[in-house]
Image (cartoon, rainbow, N blue to C red):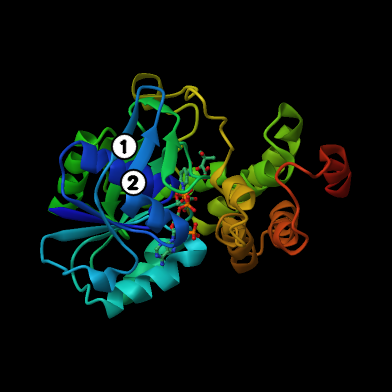
């Protein structure tokens, strides 16, 4: 199996570097300065355990790849870029090769299944930063991350087994699941805090806000008959497989949404994280005032060019009646 990683940023970069460094066949798809840097010097991967440079083929568009029947694609763009990436893959001639969505939220698989028949979900528990072109840092050890993998909407097949094996050999803990979306909904509960981390930081003083957003998430899931699996700090696999540690010489930026702000990416994933709770609330008649507010916050951060962590926690709590 050759693995094509579409969107070589924090997560995609860690995956692609791990695959290349473990001797597996990988092609990256990147853009802008990241593409230039990888082509010129490879991709530097820093972790608590190593500081290495991975070299692998990297292109700017899937049409530059001579697609093969034994290819598997891992999509690692932010959700707001998924439709564009899928359109590129279709134009390049991807058909029934397996497509794995290694992204947060639950919208990517739905978008992918509209265009492709063989779609799989991956729940990504992998704390990584991408700020500087040509470099990614991953803070998980002894494994870079823990991934739950399965077919969308359910079940598993030989492609999931092969992908779990490849990722495990690359330094990630891969687990095949028949109900991967339950894990992704569990992860989504954690990601309701991404926009809060982007705007306010991650100090304990934000806990009442996070509690409010997550309680609304749990309420809409219950109304929708969704039974999430907890992949947070209580996940028993974490102690053995993925603890958070510092990376020498690197200051962790924070959540992937905060990284988007820090890089001036011009977009943020909030519509597909808090926005999923808002959508389910509207569909099932459950009020979600905190996530409505968080959704508007995501737009405001971009519109007003607010710097990461620049908003005042007490003012926000007052606004939310906390
Ligand atoms: N970072 C983390 O710790 C974690 C992230 N996640 C999730 O993983 C997913 C990926 O996040 P993350 O790795 O942080 O995101 P990044 O923004 O770091 O990486 C995505 C990369 O894809 C590039 N890209 C987007 N569209 C295209 C395209 N059509 N062609 C080529 N390159 C493209 C982006 O370019 P550009 O920079 O120009 O936009 C960017 O470099 C998200 O769903 C996120 O929520 C999950 C767990 C942890
Ligand atoms: C859980 C968390 C915050 C880990 O980095 C994440 O998924 C993200 O940054 O999007």
Residue 116 appears in the picture as rendered? no
Q: Mark 1, mark 2: which one is toward the viewer?
A: 2
x 73%, y 48%: residue = 307
Q: In this view, does 167 lie above or below 301?
A: above
Q: Which mark is residue 99?
A: none
Quadrant in the picture for residue 109? bottom left
Residue that numbered label 2 is attached to: 41
Quadrant in the picture for residue 314? top right
x 16%, y 44%: residue = 24
Q: For this rendering, which residue is in front, 183 or 247?
A: 247
Residue 125 is left or right of residue 201, and the answer is: left
CA separation, marks 1 and 2? 8 Å
Provide residue 277's location: percent of width, then percent of height. 60, 57
Neighbourhood count class around disc 2 (C-alpha, 10 Å): few under 14, some 14–19, many 20 upward: few
Neighbourhood count class around disc 1 (C-alpha, 10 Å): few under 14, some 14–19, many 20 upward: some
Q: In this view, does 231 lie above or below 272?
A: above
x 18%, y 70%: residue = 96
* Labels 1 and 2: the sequence-earlier one: 2
- Give yes or no for contact between labels 1 and 2 (Cβ–Cβ under 8 Å): yes
């Amino acid at each position: 199996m050759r693995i094509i990683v579409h969107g070589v940023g924090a997560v995609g970069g860690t995956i692609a570097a791990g695959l290349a460094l473990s001797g597996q066949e990988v092609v990256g798809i990147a853009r802008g300065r990241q593409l230039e840097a990888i082509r010129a010097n490879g991709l530097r991967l820093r972790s608590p355990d190593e500081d290495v440079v991975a070299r692998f083929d990297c292109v700017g568009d899937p049409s530059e790849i001579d697609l093969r029947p034994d290819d598997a694609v891992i999509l690692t763009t932010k959700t707001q870029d998924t439709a564009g990436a899928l359109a590129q893959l279709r134009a390049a001639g991807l058909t029934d090769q397996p497509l794995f969505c290694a992204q947060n939220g639950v919208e990517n698989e739905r978008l992918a299944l509209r265009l492709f028949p063989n779609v799989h979900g991956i729940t990504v528990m992998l704390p990584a930063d991408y700020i500087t072109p040509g470099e990614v840092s991953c803070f998980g050890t002894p494994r870079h991350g823990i991934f739950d993998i399965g077919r969308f909407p359910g079940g598993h097949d030989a492609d999931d087994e092969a992908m779990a094996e490849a990722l495990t050999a690359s330094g990630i803990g891969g687990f095949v699941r028949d109900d991967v979306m339950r894990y992704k909904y569990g992860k989504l509960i954690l990601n309701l805090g991404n926009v809060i981390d982007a705007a306010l930081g991650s100090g304990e003083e934000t806990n009442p806000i996070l509690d409010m957003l997550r309680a609304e998430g749990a309420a809409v899931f219950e109304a929708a008959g969704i039974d999430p699996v907890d992949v947070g700090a209580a996940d028993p696999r974490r102690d053995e497989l993925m603890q958070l540690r510092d990376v020498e010489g690197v200051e962790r930026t924070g959540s992937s949404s905060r990284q988007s702000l820090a890089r001036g990416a011009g977009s943020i994933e909030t519509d597909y994280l808090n926005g999923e709770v808002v959508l389910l609330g509207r569909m099932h008649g459950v009020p979600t005032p905190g996530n409505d507010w968080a959704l508007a916050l995501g737009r405001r951060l971009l519109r007003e060019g607010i710097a990461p962590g620049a908003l005042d926690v007490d003012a926000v709590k007052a606004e939310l009646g906390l």
